[in-house]
Amino acid sequence: MMMQDLKYGLRMLAKNPGFTAVAVLTLALSIGATAALFTILDGAYIHFAPTPQGNRVAVLSQQFIKRESETWLFSPAEYFDIASFHQSFDGFFAVRHSIPILTEGTEHSTNQERVAVVHNTAGMFRLYGIPTLLGRVFTADEDQPGGPNVAVVTYRLWNRRFAHNPAIVGKTIKLDGVPYAVIGVTPRRFQEWGADIFVPLPLDRASTSRSVRTLTVAGVVKEGLSAEQTAPALRDLARRVEAQYRAANPEYDGLIYVANDVRTFVVGDLRIALYVLLGAVALLLLIATANIANLVLARTRARVREIGTRLAIGATPARLARQFLTESMLLSVIAGLVGFLLGVWALGPVVALIPAHYIGEESEIHASPTAFLISLAVAVLLGIILGTVPAVLISRRGVAANLGHTRAAADDRGAGRVRALLVLSEMGLAFVVVTAAGLMVRTYRQLTSMDLGFQPDHVLTMRIPLPESKYPGGPEITGFFQELLPRVRSLPAAVEVAASSVRPMDGVARRDFSIPGRSLNTPRGIATADYRVITPQYFAVIRTPLREGRFFREQDSRDAPGVVMVNERFARTYFPGQEAVGKQIRLENEYSGRYAAREPDGSPIVQIVGVVADSRQLTQWSAVRELYDPASPEIFVPFLQHPEAGRNMGLLVRTQTDPANLTNAVRQQALGVDADEALDDIVTLRDQADLVLGPSRLCLLLLSIFAAAAIITACVGLYAIVSYTVIRRTHEIGIRVALGARQHDVLRVVVREAMLVAATGLAVGLVASFGVTRIMSSLLYRVASNDVTTLATVSALLASVAAFASYIPARRATRLDPMVALRYE
């Protein structure tokens, strides 16, 4: 009987190719979108790493509550406090980053490149559960002080640099001229921490210094726990460390350790964006289901004579229900398979819309059995819904009602209410999806018009790392930049050139400071501000205006009095109601940041000589909520007075033409100064600024597509119900016209009833949107989740589209010949 039902179902679908094509395509588009977005969420977040242990890695930070500060860095002594702790964690490891020059037995520049090296404790490989592809990883004995120089190469570098040569194991490479023996190659997906090469991190267990923090510490959370659930155990550990070391380290007063899921750290707002998009797809799927249900219901109504005959010759309602269920399941499974294929096809273009830094290098995003099963499960669920409801409605009528069927009799009030309810639901769901798209449109406009405090267009940026072996101190670093900057400035397309320890939109470095003769309102009497070491032309390149005083000059050298510049936020915060220019501050030794280089100890007192406008120093890891924060207080110091901080400077070049066209010319000038120099992280400042918009841009584009599909689908449903109503009321319309009703009277009656259904749906959607769009609040910038302008615009748009959809069949009704209409049935 099952085979009989399948064959009959296939014949019925083939007999109605128009209905079949519309139903399959409508459902397949929604199922395909679900499969594609779930695949991205699964690959980029749920199964972020190649091993289960990698998906449980948490990065630690430590908060000094009494001092109102936080750091992601640890000293070796602090790491050893944590390394022996195993409650809630399988273990911990420490890493530190560097970007040395890689060479292979020759010093020619053609054989050199900058590579990302991760210095890590040996336990990291064991905790990740990663075997080597070739060779072995280094052991605990090899990451001790005085241990051998060994290295593990990642698959990426092995493929790109060494062409999969298995003889790499045992080969000697040089990092900044220091030889290392390659002992292994990692598997293809193991690209943790952005590494090209892993080398041992020799930490001295006898070290007692706790103020020099250069390590990132991470651990693998025990299976079954989340990073948040480790908080009580970490709190106990912090209390023990505080009690033992607070006397010598006052900052430990109120110490807290926080575990941060590394997946959330990498993926950031993309995870929220994907959840929002999946919600929009679910709503679109419901709209499509309601639309198909309307079509199925109308198609089923046309088969009531067949059903009555089946009942008359002995078929049971259960047998009929199974037949309808088989047909709808067949339709839905076909839609599910087509939808999965559409999702696989769309996966590449959708992933291309996501900025690369939101997807970990070790993540793999591809069509998976899980996505296929989800597509199939959605299809089966829809098949059950679409097959059960029509079967129940028909079988309840009984034999006599079905055999005595006429068009007027068959379309009872119950079926009419069901159709109206389905269209009402479509309009309500469409309202929510279109509102979400409208909110993202307004957010994107706010983001793109945001005043950054500088002009990112026509600026090329890059990093220039200088190895300590070749540039051991300030004089050597100063000499390099004093030769390079004039060379780059002389290029025909260059307008101005500058260098900065931290480029705009590329993270921050922070330094403690105090104000002589005055205790700041903090536990230590000192405060922390963002900190940049810059050359005099920095503000001319990024076009940040001067508010008070003067810019730096070439005369602000090592032998000149110490000077600084600050931003407006700094001046307002620490010198309220006063003129900041001429005031003095003391630069304390605490200095930390992604590219921070250690400066000589000392607490120089420096004078503020200028105040510049605030600028928004967002980064590619910034969450949208950070856009609401005001600019941070910022200190700028002249490079010539702090050359030791220039070991990894960023170069900024303002150009007359497309800045990307100047890359090779700048590289040649750098090689002209130092034939071994390799530029790193080359990007335009505009591209750097646009990275902040990644999740918002993805949401905007895909939600706009979903919104358009929702509008079309809902309006098709409204058009169908109005057309069906016109056909059902043909006889009634003929009587009205025969009794003197004019065309606009008939038009008004038909449109009014359709608009009543649409208006009710919009009202339901309006209420639902207040709750649903709150989920998007973390992605919105300067736009409320219940933004009145957006809600009013969406209401007007959908009402206009609904009026148009109902007007066409209503207009057709006004053109009916009364005599034909009166003879109808």
Image (cartoon, rainbow, N blue to C red):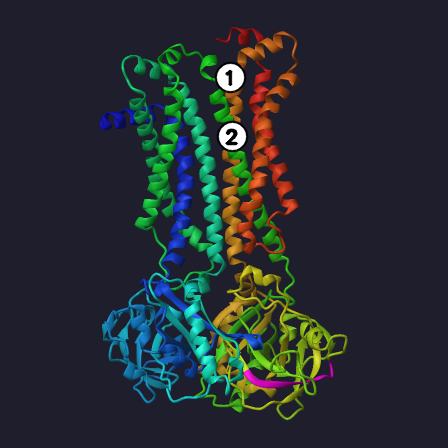
What residue did someone put label 1 on?
727
Q: Is residue 375 left or right of residue 749?
A: left
Label 1 is placed on what type of residue?
Ile
Left or right, 705 with respect to 6, comes to: right
Which residue is more in the foreground, 384 or 138? 384
| Disc 2: CA contacts within 10 A as few (<14), some (14-19) or many (>=20) | many
587 is within the stretch colored magenta = yes
Q: Vertically, is 282 above or below 4?
A: below
How far from the left and from the top, in percent, is residue 641? 61, 87
Asked if residue 339 is positioned above or below residue 726 in the image, the reply reads: below
Q: Residues within 10 Å of mark 1 (few under 14, many from 20)?
A: some
- On screen, residue 151 versus residue 78, left or right, reads left
The answer to whether residue 540 of the structure is visible from this angle is yes
Is residue 162 at all visible to an observer of this figure?
A: no
Near-viewer residue (189 or 263): 263
Tell me whether circle 1 and circle 2 mark residues in contact (CB < 8 Å).
no
In this picture, is 697 found above or below 140?
above
Query: Badge 2 is on which residue?
Result: 423
Residue type, numbered disc 2: Val
Tell me which segment is drawn in magenta: 581-590
